Image: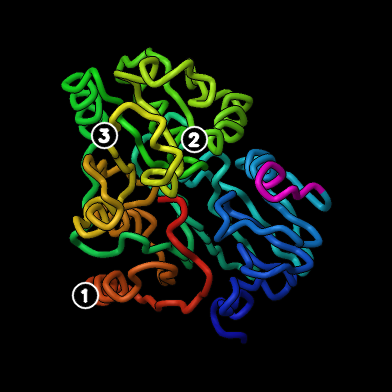
Amino acid sequence: MSAPFSWIRPEPWGIHVVPADCWIDPARPVASALVTHGHADHARGGHGRTIATPATLAIMALRYQTHEGAQPVHYGETIRLPGGVEATFVPAGHVLGSAQILLDHAGERVVVTGDYKRRPDPTCAPFAVTRCDLFVTEATFGLPVFTHPPIAQEIATLLARLAAHPDRCVLVGAYALGKAQRVIAELRAAGHSEPIYLHGALERMCRLYEEWGVALGDLRLVADAPGKDALRGRIVLCPPSALNDRWSRRLPDPITAMASGWMRVRQRARQRNVELPLIISDHADWGELTRTIAEVDPPETWITHGREEALLRWCQLHQRRARALALVGYEDEGD
């Protein structure tokens, strides 16, 4: 009799589903890849076949010009892979199209989460708790210090700062995939119906989200504004790299903000010269990571790309079998 889960093997560049000879989120081109979501540390071009949700494939086509060998799988749909492996894509709640991948083989159920969050998000389908025998979880914010506040609180802080400084604008650094659209959608949910201005690098992804049914309201490009005065009292979104570069000089005395779970760490805010840190994360925080493991209640947990040791220790203290994986190439792009 083979050892439990011997058919799924963590390698430095990804998780290998051995009977199907395919990989989950591989860090290098492979013949067959199952992709959980569109962030660059999980989705890469060059695969012979890419299996992902339709939205993830659209994101990959936009970002990486991947068109050949795409196989869409809808949420809840099960496909049969070589070697008798069945794969089902389940919502992960991370960004548009993000999925957990449930693998069934040899009487064992394995869930690979990719990245996920548990907070409600108007821009993507919510995380679905899926019982399994082996749960592979991220640990981006796998330390007890990381407790994300309610997003409504952070949006209220942003709007209050804008109202207090009508002659300035608030410039929010937000990643192009997921974070920018979520911030915009939450602003709309809070009643902010004014035009929101974008750095040009964010426009195409915002338009893609709108094509997939995510309403973002009146979006305009900073480049199309008639002058600085048109941007006073406005919210402007840009990639984090543009917060303090030459591009921002066209703005009227901007209040620099950054939307990220890492804004919990004051040193990170100071390093970026962020005046208004907004703790808005697209990953589960410590309490959500541990709650998810408890709710899934797997006999075994594998922990990857993040603060693995603390979550491993938590599992050990709660008599849960666990191991930390040593995968490479997984960064914090989505946060």
- Whether residue 218 is visible: yes
Tag 2 secondary structure = loop
Tag 1 secondary structure = helix
Is 135 left or right of 24, judged from the image as shown? left
Residue that carries the numbered disc 3 in the rendered image: 255
Whether the residues at callouts 3 and 1 have beta carbons within 8 Å, the answer is no
- Nearer to us of marks 3 and 1 is 3
Question: Residue 18 placed where, x, y %?
Answer: 69, 75
Residue 266, quarter of the rendered image: bottom left
Residue 259, quarter of the rendered image: top left
The 10 Å Cα crowd at callout 1, few under 14, some 14 to 19, many 20 or more, is: few
Q: Amino acid at mark 3?
A: Ile
Question: Residue 153 placed where, x, y %?
Answer: 20, 32
Range of magenta residues: 60-67
Q: CA distance from mark 2 to mark 1?
A: 34 Å
Q: Amino acid at mark 2?
A: Cys
Is 1 within the magenta? no
Question: Residue 61 placed where, x, y %?
Answer: 72, 44
Residue at (48% x, 19% y) in the render: 225
- Nearer to us of marks 2 and 1 is 2
Whether the residues at callouts 2 and 1 have beta carbons within 8 Å, the answer is no
Question: Residue 324 placed where, x, y %?
Answer: 40, 77
Residue that carries the numbered disc 2 in the rendered image: 124
- Nearer to us of marks 3 and 2 is 3
In primary-sequence order, the first of circles 3 and 2 is 2
